[in-house]
Image (cartoon, coloured by chain):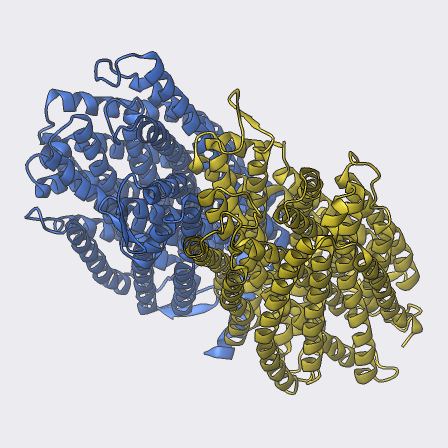
Chain colours: A yellow, B blue
Amino acid sequence: MDNIVYLIPALGALGLVAMAIKSAWVNKQDKGDANMQELAGYIARGAMAFLRAEWKILAYFAVITAILLGWSGTLVEDSHPLIAVSFVIGAVLSALAGYIGMKIATAANVRTTQAARSSLAKALRVSFTGGSVMGIGVAGIAVLGMGALFIILYQIFVPEGAALTGVEMKRAIEVLAGFSLGAESIALFARVGGGIYTKAADVGADLVGKVEAGIPEDDVRNPATIADNVGDNVGDVAGMGADLFGSYVATILATMVLGQEINAAGDNYGGLSPIILPMVIAGLGLIFSIVGTWFVRIKNETDSVQGALNIGNWSSIILTAIASYFAVTLLLPETLTHRGVTFTSLDVFYAIVIGLVVGALMSMITEYYTGMGRRPVLSIIKQSGTGHATNIIGGLSVGMESTVLPILVLAGGIVSSYWVAGLYGVAIAASGMMATTAMQLAIDAFGPIADNAGGIAEMSQLPEEVRHRTDNLDAVGNTTAATGKGFAIASAALTSLALFAAFVGVSGIDAINIYNAEVLAGLFVGGMIPFIFSSLAIAAVGRAAMDMVNEVRRQFREIPGIMEYKAKPEYEKCVAISTKASLREMIAPGAIALLAPAIVGFSFGPEVLGGMLAGITVSGVLMGMFQSNAGGAWDNAKKSFEKGVEINGEMFYKKSEPHKASVTGDTVGDPFKDTSGPSMNILIKLTSIVALIIAPHIAETPHGAAEAKETVEKKTEIVMSAPHTDKH
Amino acid sequence: MDNIVYLIPALGALGLVAMAIKSAWVNKQDKGDANMQELAGYIARGAMAFLRAEWKILAYFAVITAILLGWSGTLVEDSHPLIAVSFVIGAVLSALAGYIGMKIATAANVRTTQAARSSLAKALRVSFTGGSVMGIGVAGIAVLGMGALFIILYQIFVPEGAALTGVEMKRAIEVLAGFSLGAESIALFARVGGGIYTKAADVGADLVGKVEAGIPEDDVRNPATIADNVGDNVGDVAGMGADLFGSYVATILATMVLGQEINAAGDNYGGLSPIILPMVIAGLGLIFSIVGTWFVRIKNETDSVQGALNIGNWSSIILTAIASYFAVTLLLPETLTHRGVTFTSLDVFYAIVIGLVVGALMSMITEYYTGMGRRPVLSIIKQSGTGHATNIIGGLSVGMESTVLPILVLAGGIVSSYWVAGLYGVAIAASGMMATTAMQLAIDAFGPIADNAGGIAEMSQLPEEVRHRTDNLDAVGNTTAATGKGFAIASAALTSLALFAAFVGVSGIDAINIYNAEVLAGLFVGGMIPFIFSSLAIAAVGRAAMDMVNEVRRQFREIPGIMEYKAKPEYEKCVAISTKASLREMIAPGAIALLAPAIVGFSFGPEVLGGMLAGITVSGVLMGMFQSNAGGAWDNAKKSFEKGVEINGEMFYKKSEPHKASVTGDTVGDPFKDTSGPSMNILIKLTSIVALIIAPHIAETPHGAAEAKETVEKKTEIVMSAPHTDKH
């Protein structure tokens, strides 16, 4: 094996060193007075309690799944019992990524509050550095973990001199797929559980606190306020971290599976280049994300926080793109052929650029549909003037409309990256898009840290200006949360397509023909899965929020003196309700995602399973965008009332009738945008990974891929040549 | 041509005779006092004014499309300029079906009010006979029109002794497809336009009348009340009639296209049997629907109206099933082969039974999800207790969940009908399901007639007991409306699959491989179309309702004495607003449905278009069920408050806070269940028909179908044999 491969874990390790330095810096900052520390302590303990409870449940799941996987690995030539170990490593590292994020976020929140007492610049620096620790940590663990595991598996499975397109290498990568399954399945539970936790607490706290008792958000008298702040860490930090860790790993894996099919014996790295390229790009993206974080600085109170984040983001994207050019041209041979499509190394670079462009466009479109002052949000504001119902109709309509442009961009991205470099091009475009995950996640995680900082400021009754500074950061955090979701769903869609292609190769089918009645039935059933998944997720939030409402009402009733600050509410009871509800309710959707593809695959074979995956992907992407964007737009329509809005020539402010209607929309949007919407990403990736893992077991040719691949190559040539000769 | 073919138009004509008799009976009934007649006159004139205005616009559309079609018919061997004539006939007959329905509904409404002054039994008889006129008329026109046109086209195109599997017969059926395109495109505009009309008026009337002015629904002082009642006729009668006319015709056509591919030279009818079978079944279903109407009777005030309708419905279904058995065994040869699948005539009968079972199950599931006193509606009621937002979350969650069972039933129906008789089996299952359309439509159309009758009773301030009787009928009408929608979407899904199969045959492609990147992109874009279509439709309702609100507010302000019954509101201004808005807003969604498949087909070829159709179908079926069922459940959750509901041990009635929350849900559900939801049926069928019409132009082999079909047969044999040898 060429030495260049060792570069990958080295880059990952370098990232972790940078993370440790940044983490030490955050922990060195002043953590404020005793009162602030006490409140922050509640939050940190609540968050850790949730993580521990979640891990306990997931440990059972992981052990059982590992045993099943290990056993299954003995059944076919293309797999190996070691897949169980690989799975466990993926699961543990995913949990570790969530843990690091939670740890730093619950340390950075109170320190951001304290920093906000002196200046906005300082508050941004603390909160964003906290976010960076999370982002760099997640990406670093992924690159180091996958890189090292790949090296080990290569040493175990691939004998000296074996052709890399052969069954040995295929087996090594199939075992590596276990890592991705581990990462993604933990991500699913973390995202769904965290999403239910945070929104149950949020909705419950708002319904009784704001609406019934008339106290402000994050008021220390509200028994659910600690649970609400814990929720930000559990859902938006740990859940999001595990989600992007899973995406990152899945994208790299899918590209490696396709890369393994390419005969690149002519490169200078023993033919390894198309396989390791996605990991190399990830490593470079990690390093340039760290570089990008240096540019996120402001000087004065009036400087634009969003502007600073944009500069950091764009510099990391551009630097990664430039570095990719060199990586691609240095690593890959002049020309490559994959499943009958021939392309040059430069074409691969173009595919990476397409991925970066698609990601950027998706973020911009999402910002348009959810940003304040734009037509969509303004239309919802206007429709709040005629009541709750028209506000809801407006938001639903905006959410549905917001699928159009992203789908066209996505379709354009799929087709163009396919045109330049075949299915490998589609996969590498996804890898390019995901390369700067560390930066994306830093920007994403900064939001909930600032949100928490504001909560602590409010609960500690700090001066107005402190809350003002944290609100400024929080508002930017809301926008970055929305654009981050647009980015995440786009990457999930491209990744799924790559996994889909990988699945076809491994399962040895030559086509997924939707005109076959059984495949069409699979497509219908697949399309339905995001609907039932969303239904379960939002219903869970509704139920848990009702429990929360009843508990808060009970405390107000039974503990005298809460409203006069004389008695302390029993915060931990509310924390326990959210924890219990989220852990109970995450099981059913998780089980659907894991079992549905397995059941269909083993009962009806790979082609029907392929139809089902296509159905899940299409419907999941649409439902994800619809729900996330509708929720984001409702949220900002409500926020617009803080500064006052004009409806038919009249000004309306907080507590007006139209504002109440906008609060209804925001509350409906909460589970949409933070529970069910973002879970769609994981749903579509996880089902594809499950399919890929079971593919060797349900393959049409008993021997598996080796022969099947040839058939695929031949057949695809026919399928693909038809449109090409017609139109190009 | 065998004489049996003449039986088909004869059955249609027989139906029309029955319709005329029933219509005369309705018109002979007492139409009440002068005041009632005046109000009914407003409604009838408003409805006719809308129809005329709509026809004027559609005439332009029809002429332009006819010219394009005629010209296109000269370009390929598989078509003919006569397709333009066929299109115009379809369009005119569809408009005629809507006209008949509107005419009888606006005559039956006031007569039902008058009948309700004496007894429930009489009121049911008048309103249901009115509905029957509509149902029998629509089915009769379809059977007579298609049957007669088929005979004429056969005489023109098919020379004596030509093989019916040859290009001549194919051309005759392609020209007949123009009839279906005409019917379905008029249906789209009628459904969308009517849906916007009725809900703009309904929402607008409710928001100002009920909420702001505090006057009851259908109060004569509300300027929008006439528009609201006109809307019932425009949307629920004319729109629904055109919709089911289109479905009925499309289903028959799709089965004929597939039947033409079957070599049935061994039958006793010159090989015509698989082609004419769907028309024969439709004719039989028409006759037994008429028989079924005789059973819809009650005697006493306390008899169950729903029970009477059920008896009528089930007797027509069972009689049609029995008759189908004889038709199938008498007409078809012992064994048939279609695209490589061989099956017996008895298998075809089983497919019909599968269709009937699927239709019945779909209705039952829909009833469960939208019926009062069941778990889904009760859960929404409970969630109304914590406010508007949780009511909305509850309804959305129920709507999403309600897709699960119908999709599983549908997938089971597709696969099992395919197993028994190949793709012809799937198509004939749809035909079986649609056979009793006359009865289905009679039950459906009876609802809005009763609703109107209640409106007239309220406006004329008739005694309590009259309104009580019409309310009884109206409540049953709400349930039948919901189950009718479940039935309509199921039939649309099966029909689309049949059209899909027909499209594959005519376009000469051998597979629609979603693992091809371009096809997958098509699938994504197709999946998005129901979202933008729904978005446009519900946004249109929101906008038009706001116009209506402003106009009603203006009248209350500027016309003194309305509230004291001293001045008459300007009803016609509100009618004009709804008319104008609906005609303006129906253009964009209609254009999308007609143009999107044409653009994609001509730009990217038939396989990508096939992917797009699959995306539209899957996403359209899901969105249709989700929206229709959520709307129905919200509606009945609100209605439950009339008798009082228990939430956490406390009773709540109308005007309580939970009731207000339930009104919000109902208002959101209005455009869901009556505008965008039911439009999904037409969207998925119309796009498939457009694809079928353009198929010869974009066929992969220049000569078109003749050679292509052979390839299809060979290839499908491979695709289909794989799962069969594996599992059966």
x and y, in percent, of residue A100 in the image: 73, 65
Which residue: 88% across, 69% down? Answer: A10
Task: Give coordinates of residue B521: x percent, y percent.
Answer: 63, 51
Q: Quadrant of the image for the N terminus of chain A?
A: bottom right
A165 vs B223, nearest the viewer:
B223
Residue B81 visible in rendering: no
Q: Nearer the viewer, residue B516 or B129?
A: B129
The one nearer the camera, A578 or A242, is: A578
Residue placed farthest to the front in the image? A566
Q: Looking at the image, is B49 positioned above or below residue A32?
A: above
Answer with left or right where residue B596 lies relative to residue B107: right
Q: Quadrant of residue A8?
A: bottom right
Residue at x 26%, y 16% (from the top left corner)? B562
Q: Is residue B23 visible?
A: yes
> Residue B684, position in %: x, y?
46, 47
Q: Quadrant of residue A336?
A: bottom right
Q: In the rendered view, would you say A683 is above or below B73?
A: below
Q: Where does the image place residue A259, in percent across and percent down from the top left?
A: 78, 67
The residue that appears at 33% across and 51% down in the rendered structure is B381
Residue B490 in the figure: left or right of residue A74:
left
